[in-house]
Amino acid sequence: MLLPPPPSHSAQRNEAVLSLIGNTPLVELRFEPEGVTIHAKCEFLNPSGSIKDRLAQCIILDAEKRGLLGPDSIILECTSGNTGISLAMIGAALGYRVTILMSGSASRERRLCIRQFGAELILFESGASYQTGIDISLAMAAKDSRYFLPRQFENPLNAEDHVHTTAQEILWQVPHLVDAFVAGYGTGGSLAGCGKAIKARCPDARVIAMEPEEAAMLAGELPCCHWIEGIAGGFVPPLLRAAPLDGTIKVKSAEALAMTQRLNRQFGLLVGTSSGANVAAAVKIAQDLRPGACVVTLLCDRADRYFSTRLFNDDGADLEQFDANAMAARKAKD
Ligand SMILES: Cc1ncc(COP(=O)(O)O)c(C=O)c1O
């Protein structure tokens, strides 16, 4: 379904918003009952509200340098969330048309953000897989040379940019060396890129992939339903193959939600569910390391992406029910 055209599109270039991307703070979070401190990189402070602003800026500026974008170009990506919002923001600022392909099940707040930046949305059927959207984007690009596809899942710049920006920032922000870096993966770009650069500077650091317990694919399990949006899309992404991983850690969806709500209510950090999952994993890792070890993780996006999800409509009883349902679904699948 093609929604009506967005209200305006300007060919003018306004680069101010680019200066707000990156150089995010690294904050120390003290967990009293657990007796550990972790270091969290505040990627939710990027201007559109997520870590994906880095990737969108890097890929679009690189495409410009290589002459792949002109005044008629249309940036086209299939994405269910943050990348679409980031590309729409960059397109608005640099004067490019942006078209985002999304499943009809994508949340209303995400659709509204993308449209508010003036991008077009094409929705495909709700039950269809992510691959359906990719296939549609490839077919559109084959017919019309104006389309430029950032292809975040395969584009090596996705990981490389984190080597040169996010990881370097972390390395000068930490008090000493990094003992462990833990993060979930969607495309795998942030985990692979940060992991590579941190290992290069701190060879003894452990780089750990966080996975939802219900979809622990690196741990060799079948993907199943989980609530941690933005990560573990049901396959191991190609960018993760080159990641220097020392291990994996599982976090239950219910645990991720509970930690996200704790970050919201006890730390005043209005972050989304993958941030809660990352922090839950970082706390567990810190508990297993020597006191004072430097464990770093990412706070990937803001909670306002999740108004219509369980993060804002939840209570403990529901979380327990989810665990029971996920277990039953897994048994049925096995
Ligand atoms: C909310 C959220 N957290 C984490 C990630 C993981 O980032 P990456 O794609 O670098 O693996 C994503 C990616 O889409 C995301 O949207």
Image (cartoon, rainbow, N blue to C red):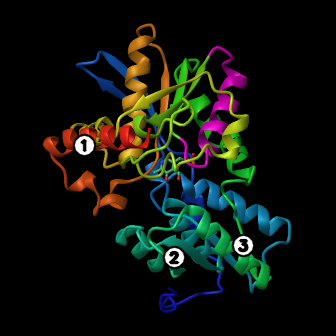
Q: Amino acid at mark 3?
A: Leu
Q: Position of residue 34 (x, y in %)?
A: 28, 18
In the figure, residue 171 lies in which quadrant?
Answer: top right
Of 26 and 224, the residue lying toward us? 224
Residue at left offset 66%, top offset 39%: 240
- Secondary element at tag 2: strand
Q: What count of labels does the image hold?
A: 3
Q: Name which residue type carries label 2.
A: Phe
Disc 1 and disc 2: Cα gap in Å?
32 Å
Judging depth in this view, the residue of 105 and 314 nearest the camera is 105
> Residue 222: image x %, image y %?
50, 39
Tell me the amino acid under the disc marked 1: Gln
User: Would you call the spot at circle 3 few (<14 residues within 10 Å), some (14-19), or many (20 or more)?
Assistant: some
| Residue 144 shows in the view | no
Q: Which residue is mark 2?
A: 124
Q: Which residues are magenta?
A: 185-204
Task: State the mark number for residue 185.
Answer: none
- Residue 191 on the magenta span: yes
Question: Viewed as shown, does residue 82 lie left or right of 241?
Answer: left
Left or right, 258 with respect to 41, comes to left
Q: Which residue is mark 3?
A: 138
